[in-house]
């Protein structure tokens, strides 16, 4: 009997493997390579990749960037900001998203700059009309992450925080308005 | 050390006894320490389970039991007591089974084992008390499981973690010494598979614990301002060496327990030593790379680094898990067919001892871990798909699929087994005990699915007191997800009731259960101890790999199909999103 509680008998390395087990090994190996290949390939041909440049930045320095950027932008009647160019700066701050609400144009590629002025936050974004279409990114103090984004559908997009950041965590909400054209 | 007559089996002159169920030679020293660590684990399960109730009843916002500040405290205690204390105490017990007991040796340096236990208990108490009494914002935040710097938690918390980790390392030393001596005395002899699995587990554990020690010792220094700078990216990468590493200990320990219990209680055999051991070796090399799963939607780490690590180097460890996914049920199928207990395609399964909670808990653990925890772990670990899972409630669904319906269920079965074979008590409330795994697996399985749907389809975040009915300061909310939370809440209550039944049966058996008399445990034993290792009386024995495995093959093909469908669906959801990234 081949018991897992006893040392195996004889030359166990040379024991035959059941044909069905061999087939399963083949299928598993193939599947493993396939999903690695797809994931790796998608970084080249796919449209959704969590890849962007990271630069180190002190909190004060990033705050200055956001302040300058907001001063250069145009404020709409409802307080929403029209960015001065194709860069959008957002800073997580206990417990608000500095730089929101912001208005961007559908079909235009923006560089979203994400960082935090205090602790770690989670940038969780979805359009109001389709909650299943959501994306999530970690936001770290000390690092500015530049993620290109192109929204294809106009509408209101909501940003909530999904990394615990203290007592007021659940109140952290921001708004991004995507319009046909600016 | 003989409280309530719990530590008083009949041992021979030399301190050994032969187990009537497994046929193993068990020394008093090993058995008593298994009991000590096992009992402590059950206490942690009870504490963590109480917080499971308060946490679930808060996330079900219709009930809304706790205020946000309290919620984070309760969530922290739920996580630490269940994910860490319950599991790590059990795992030390499992090492003592997989080492000394399986090899028929004494537990060496028992003083060190006890010192490890005392240190672990001290660490656990420090963590619990410091979290419970934490003042909150700004510098005494609840740490949750991760205590992500630079958000500050009470200094005593970090100290408690360091103490606990040191305790776990110390408690593992007698196991390492056992293996060392076994190899010195028997050069060239192969370890039994269970001992081999325990050894692999211990190495994975050692890596995780050392990583954790570096992380938390440094963080403690930062917190008491002995060092001034803490890089959050460094912290995340270092933290997850233990944060995910401990989950890999759970995995490897659980797989070892699966081989052990299916053999003893179900009559499983090892269909290929070569294949199963290779899978453990793959774990050893690659499983801890999975720590990177938490950094898929992070800045700082390069995409090459992420692709290599998230795939455990080209899915080396996922491949290993798929090997076990075949080998363990195949062992059961072939072993039972060999004993004439398996007609047709699934006769080996339908004829199995389903009334025995040790068996049913183990089988449900295998199935649910694979289908709920395993598949989702690989899918969400794909770098791009991770954007739709990261920090959502779906992530919580994934790890309840691994550690709740997987590891916890397997360990519950193991505790029942230990009560009967080591504490030598018949199970109290035996009918209730028989239904317990069914109730827990069923209810918790539904909870896991609801968590995943809430996260994926409605973007509900994890770790939030309220966000479905109301986000303060805005009209926007995720109220569309409310019906899912009603289901989640109801089935969470059932799952917690199953937890209550577990504790009731465990404690009831120890305090009130009848002592096992000769013959009482016959139902636990699928294998004949006398014939163990020998040839059958009719002469040549057909090797186990020559028996049919077509039932298992079909089940694993269904598993692969579900895997493929989940994979495709998740990618489909992702590609529906707007364009992001370089």
Image: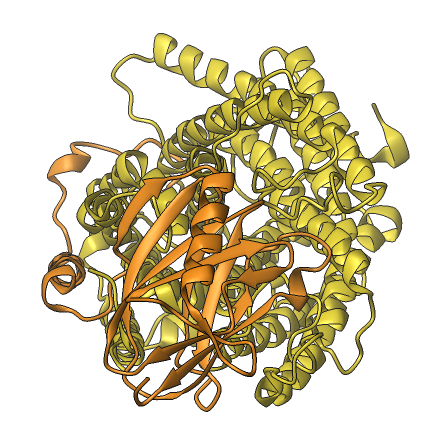
Q: Which chain is yellow?
A: B
Which colour denotes chain A?
orange
- Residue B371 in the image: state x and y as whole percent: 39, 69
Figure label count: 0
- Can residue B50 be seen here? The reply is no
Is B327 above or below relative to B517? below
In the displayed structure image, the side of residue B102 where residue B558 appears, left or right: left
Is B218 above or below relative to B126? above
- Residue B78 in the image: state x and y as whole percent: 71, 53
In the displayed structure image, the side of residue B432 where residue B197 appears, left or right: left
As rendered, which of B60 and B282 lies closer to the eye? Answer: B60
Residue drawn at the location 65% of the way across and 30% of the way down:
B161
Is A128 above or below relative to B213? below
Quadrant in the picture for residue B113: top right
Location of the N terminus of chain A (image quadrant): top left
As rendered, which of B541 and B372 lies closer to the eye? Answer: B372
Location of the C terminus of chain A (image quadrant): bottom left
In the displayed structure image, the side of residue B122 where residue B557 appears, left or right: left
Q: How is the image coloured?
A: by chain
Residue drawn at the location 38% of the way across and 34% of the way down:
A6
- Can residue A38 be seen here? The reply is yes
Residue drawn at the location 53% of the way across and 48% of the way down:
A120
- Residue B466 in the image: state x and y as whole percent: 70, 72
Quadrant in the picture for residue B340: bottom left
Residue drawn at the location 67% of the way across and 44% of the way down:
B143
As rendered, which of B158 and B486 lies closer to the eye? Answer: B158
- Residue B532 in the image: state x and y as whole percent: 40, 41
């Amino acid at each position: 009997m081949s018991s897992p509680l006893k040392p195996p008998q004889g030359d166990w390395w040379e024991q035959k493997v059941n044909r069905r087990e061999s087939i399963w090994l083949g299928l598993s190996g193939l599947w493993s390579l396939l999903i690695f290949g797809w994931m790796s390939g998608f970084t080249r041909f796919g449209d959704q990749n969590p890849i962007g440049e990271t630069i180190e930045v002190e909190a004060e320095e990033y705050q200055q960037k956001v302040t300058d950027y907001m001063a250069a932008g145009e404020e709409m009647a409802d307080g929403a900001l029209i960015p001065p160019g194709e860069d959008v700066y957002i800073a997580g701050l206990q417990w608000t998203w500095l730089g929101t609400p912001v208005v961007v144009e559908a079909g235009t590629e923006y560089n979203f700059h994400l960082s935090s002025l205090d602790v770690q936050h989670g940038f969780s974004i979805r359009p109001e009309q389709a909650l299943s279409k959501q994306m999530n990114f970690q936001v770290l103090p000390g690092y500015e992450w530049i993620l290109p984004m192109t929204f294809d559908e106009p509408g209101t997009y909501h940003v909530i925080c999904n990394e615990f950041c203290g007592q007021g965590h659940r109140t952290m909400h921001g708004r991004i308005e995507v319009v046909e054209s600016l | 050390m003989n409280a309530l007559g719990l530590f008083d089996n009949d041992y021979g002159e030399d301190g050994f006894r032969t187990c009537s169920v497994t046929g193993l030679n068990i020394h008093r020293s090993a058995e008593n320490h298994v009991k000590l660590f096992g009992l402590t684990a059950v206490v942690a399960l009870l504490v963590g389970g109480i917080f499971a109730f308060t946490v679930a009843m808060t996330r079900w916002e219709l009930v809304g039991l706790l205020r946000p500040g309290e919620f984070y405290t309760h969530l922290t205690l739920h996580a630490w007591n269940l994910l860490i204390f319950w599991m790590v105490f059990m795992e030390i017990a499992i090492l003592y089974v997989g080492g000394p007991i399986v090899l028929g040796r004494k537990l060496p340096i028992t003083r060190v084992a006890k010192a490890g236990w005392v240190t672990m208990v001290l660490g656990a108490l420090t963590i619990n008390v410091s979290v419970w009494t934490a003042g909150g914002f700004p510098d005494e935040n609840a740490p949750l499981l991760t205590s992500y710097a630079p958000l500050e938690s009470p200094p005593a918390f970090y100290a408690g973690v360091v103490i606990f980790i040191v305790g776990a390392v110390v408690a593992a030393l007698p196991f390492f010494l056992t293996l060392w001596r076994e190899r010195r005395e028997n050069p060239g002899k192969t370890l039994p598979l269970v001992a081999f699995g325990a050894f692999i587990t211990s190495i994975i554990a050692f890596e995780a614990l050392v990583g954790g020690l570096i992380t938390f010792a440094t963080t403690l220094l930062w917190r008491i301002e002995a060092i001034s700078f803490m890089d959050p990216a460094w912290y995340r990468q270092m933290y997850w060496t233990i944060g995910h590493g401990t989950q890999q200990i759970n995995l490897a320990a659980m797989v070892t327990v699966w081989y052990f219990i299916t053999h003893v209680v179900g009559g499983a055999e090892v269909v290929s030593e070569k294949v199963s051991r290779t899978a453990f070796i793959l774990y050893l090399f690659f499983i801890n790379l999975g720590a990177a799963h938490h950094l898929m939607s992070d800045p700082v780490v390069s995409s090459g680094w992420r692709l290599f690590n998230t795939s455990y180097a080209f899915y080396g460890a996922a491949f290993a898990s798929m090997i076990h996914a075949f080998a363990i049920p195949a062992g059961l199928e072939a072993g039972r067919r060999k004993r004439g207990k398996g007609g047709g395609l699934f006769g080996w399964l339908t004829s199995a001892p389903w009334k025995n909670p040790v068996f049913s808990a183990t089988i449900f653990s295998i199935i649910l871990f694979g289908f709920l925890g395993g598949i989702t772990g690989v899918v969400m670990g794909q770098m791009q798909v991770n954007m739709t899972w990261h920090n959502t409630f779906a992530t919580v669904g994934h790890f309840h699929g691994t550690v709740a319906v997987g590891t916890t269920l397997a360990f519950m079965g193991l505790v029942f087994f230990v009560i009967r074979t080591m504490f030598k008590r018949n199970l109290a409330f035996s009918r209730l005990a028989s239904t317990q795994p069914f109730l827990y697996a069923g209810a918790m399985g539904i909870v896991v699915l609801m968590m995943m749907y809430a996260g994926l389809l409605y973007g509900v975040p994890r770790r939030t007191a309220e966000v479905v009915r109301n986000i303060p300061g805005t009209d926007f909310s995720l109220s569309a997800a409310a019906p899912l939370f009603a289901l989640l809440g109801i089935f969470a209550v059932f799952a917690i009731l199953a937890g209550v039944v577990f504790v009731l049966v465990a404690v009831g058996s120890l305090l009130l259960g009848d002592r096992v008399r000769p013959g009482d445990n016959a139902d636990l034993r699928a294998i004949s101890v006398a014939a163990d290792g020998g040839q059958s009386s009719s002469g040549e024995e057909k090797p186990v790999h020559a028996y049919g495995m077509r039932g298992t093959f079909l089940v694993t093909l269904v598993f692969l199909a579900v895997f493929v469908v989940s994979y495709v669906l998740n990618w489909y959801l992702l590609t529906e999103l707007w364009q992001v990234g370089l």
